[in-house]
């Protein structure tokens, strides 16, 4: 209805302009009076046609795109931009009088260009520093989706959700702030869950189940946010740009995303690094019980695993595969893949070999 109304109004206005232009052109070119009506009617018809066809693409579509873009802008950004524009207008008004007294044409054009430049600078400065100003004046900025940006936000990556350990961590209360799941991450999870490959499909479904568990059990608030980044297509690229824009951190188990985020100044919380950091520390001489799961690489070695996944290499443990044995820690080795414990059999088990 709006487009039809604009077409009618545009056709009427341009048709009238064309009719008037036809009359003026006929007078300038000394067209005989009997042909003046034909020229005016012809130009009027061209104006009507141009108004019907050209006005919507020139007015409606750009305005619609502008309004949709404005809707996606967070409310605090709009407020900050408006404040910057207001401050620039005040400064421009104060400078208008002295600038208008410049000699010749400079006095006419300088105030206008100064106002445009100050408006641009004011908006840019306020958009870049408004969160810092909000913190200084204790203003709890809140965006257009209701997300409180004055608190620390954590962006969940697809890999962290599928991994599942973040759900276990969230119920302990150790996670600060709010957990945000961008809608484009949710869409990627749905795409993986619909994959024809059975392994990817199972991973996607596990991710959706973990997200459902997060929403039900997490002590930290979990929110689905509509924030999006125009331009980049990759989910990882969008996450990094969104984290930089909102000054949030990324929670991930993807080593490559961790490195890329760090290089761009974004804080990344790697679940794998957390798991390595909270593993139980064993010192040489301590005793523990481990189940030998398989043979080791060296002759006579047996390999077992603790509950947290730490590998334990037991000397002369090969003949105890499938059994639980008491061992004494001899050495602890920290590697890039994690922590390894070397041990020997304890007491009677060592003598029975």
Image (cartoon, rainbow, N blue to C red):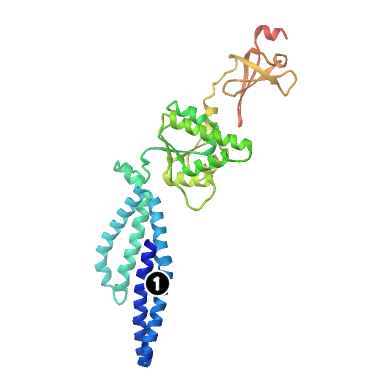
Nearer to the camera, 126 or 202: 202
Q: Quadrant of the N terminus?
A: bottom left
Res. 174 image quadrant: top left
**Which residue is pictured at 38% across the width and 68% down the height?**
7
**Which residue is pictured at 47% across the width and 49% down the height?**
229
Vertical side of 180 occupied by 34: above or below: below
Give residue 269's position: percent from left, percent from top.
Answer: 49, 35
Q: Quadrant of the C terminus?
A: top right
**Which residue is pictured at 43% across the width and 70% down the height?**
53
Q: Residues within 10 Å of mark 1 (few under 14, many from 20)?
A: many
Q: Is residue 174 visible?
A: no
Res. 349 image quadrant: top right
Give residue 214's position: percent from left, percent from top.
Answer: 46, 31
Q: Is residue 331 visible?
A: yes
Total tally of numbered discs in the picture: 1
Q: Secondary structure at mark 1?
A: helix
Give residue 96's position: percent from left, percent from top.
Answer: 26, 67
Q: Which residue bears the numbered disc 1?
A: 51
Vertical side of 89 occupied by 228: above or below: above
Vertical side of 129 occupied by 196: above or below: above
**In the orientation shown, which residue stands out farthest toward the right?**
299
Give residue 125's position: percent from left, percent from top.
Answer: 36, 53
């Amino acid at each position: 209805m709006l487009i039809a109304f604009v077409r009618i109004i545009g056709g009427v206005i341009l048709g009238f302009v064309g009719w008037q232009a036809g009359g003026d052109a006929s007078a300038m070119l000394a067209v005989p009076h009997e042909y003046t009506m034909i020229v005016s009617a012809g130009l009027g018809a061209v104006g009507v046609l141009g108004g019907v066809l050209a006005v919507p693409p020139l007015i409606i579509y750009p305005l619609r795109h502008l309004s949709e873009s404005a809707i996606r802008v967070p409310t605090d950004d709009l407020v900050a931009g408006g404040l910057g524009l207001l401050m620039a207008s005040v400064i421009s008004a104060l400078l208008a009088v002295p600038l208008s007294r410049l000699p010749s044409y400079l006095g006419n054009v300088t105030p206008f260009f100064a106002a445009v430049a100050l408006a641009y600078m004011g908006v840019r400065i306020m958009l870049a520093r408004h969160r810092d100003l909000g913190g200084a004046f204790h203003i709890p900025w809140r965006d257009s989706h209701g997300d409180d940006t004055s608190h620390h936000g954590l962006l969940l990556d697809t890999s962290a959700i599928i991994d599942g350990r973040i759900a276990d961590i969230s119920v302990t209360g150790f996670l600060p702030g709010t957990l945000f799941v961008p809608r484009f991450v949710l869409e990627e999870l749905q795409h993986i869950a619909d994959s024809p490959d059975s392994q990817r499909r199972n991973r996607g479904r596990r991710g959706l189940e973990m997200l459902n568990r997060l929403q039900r059990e997490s002590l930290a608030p979990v929110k689905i946010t509509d924030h999006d980044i125009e331009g980049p297509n990759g989910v990882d690229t969008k996450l990094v740009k969104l984290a930089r824009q909102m000054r949030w951190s990324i929670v991930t188990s993807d080593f490559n995303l961790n490195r890329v985020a760090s290089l761009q100044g974004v804080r990344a919380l790697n679940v794998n690094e957390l798991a390595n950091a909270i593993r139980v520390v064993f010192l040489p001489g301590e005793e523990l019980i481990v189940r030998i799961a398989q043979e080791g690489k060296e002759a006579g070695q047996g390999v077992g695993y603790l509950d947290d996944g730490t590998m334990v290499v037991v000397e002369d443990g090969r003949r105890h595969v499938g059994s639980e044995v008491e061992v004494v820690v001899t050495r602890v080795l920290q590697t890039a893949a994690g922590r390894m414990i070397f041990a020997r059999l304890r007491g009677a088990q060592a003598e029975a070999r």
